[in-house]
Amino acid sequence: MAKVTKDMIIIDVLRMDPDCAQIFFKNGLHCIGCPSASGESIEEASAVHGLDPNKLIKELNDYFEA
């Protein structure tokens, strides 16, 4: 099973399972299709959007574990 980390690039996580986009959307990251998603890590995007990256990572890892 893959483990999501805060240094992972958003598009790489989406490639693991495109349906995880719902978690990004739920957390206010609606720009997953923009160029930033191809270059920003989860930690960087979280900082820009004022999110807790650890919360997002937990939700993503819970999703992938299910």
Image (spheres, rainbow, N blue to C red):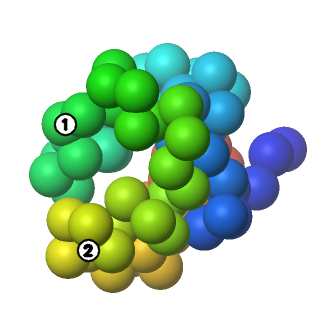
Q: Which residue is mark 2?
A: 51
Q: Which residue is mark 1?
A: 30
Q: Residues within 10 Å of mark 2 (few under 14, many from 20)?
A: some
Q: In the image, what residue type sits under mark 1?
A: His
Q: Secondary structure at mark 2?
A: loop
Instruction: Tell me if residue 5 can be seen.
Output: yes
> Residue at horizontal 80%, vertical 46%?
2
Q: Residues within 10 Å of mark 1 (few under 14, many from 20)?
A: some
Mark 2 → mark 1, Cα distance in angstroms: 13 Å
In the rendered image, residue 26, in percent from the top left (x then y), is placed at 18, 47
In the rendered view of the protein, which quadrant contains the N terminus?
Answer: top right
Rendered position, 20 above or below 6? above
Q: In the image, what residue type sits under mark 2?
A: Leu
> Residue at horizontal 67%, vertical 64%?
7
In the rendered image, residue 48, in percent from the top left (x then y), is placed at 27, 67
* Residue in the foreground of this view, choosing between 31 and 27: 31
In the rendered image, residue 24, in percent from the top left (x then y), is placed at 31, 44
Q: Secondary structure at mark 1?
A: loop
Question: CB of mark 2 within 8 Å of CB of mark 1?
Answer: no
Rendered position, 19 above or below 21? above
> Residue at horizontal 55%, vertical 55%?
41
Instruction: Tell me if residue 56 can be seen.
Output: no
In the rendered image, residue 51, in percent from the top left (x then y), is placed at 26, 74
Of mark 2 and mark 1, the one earlier in the sequence is 1
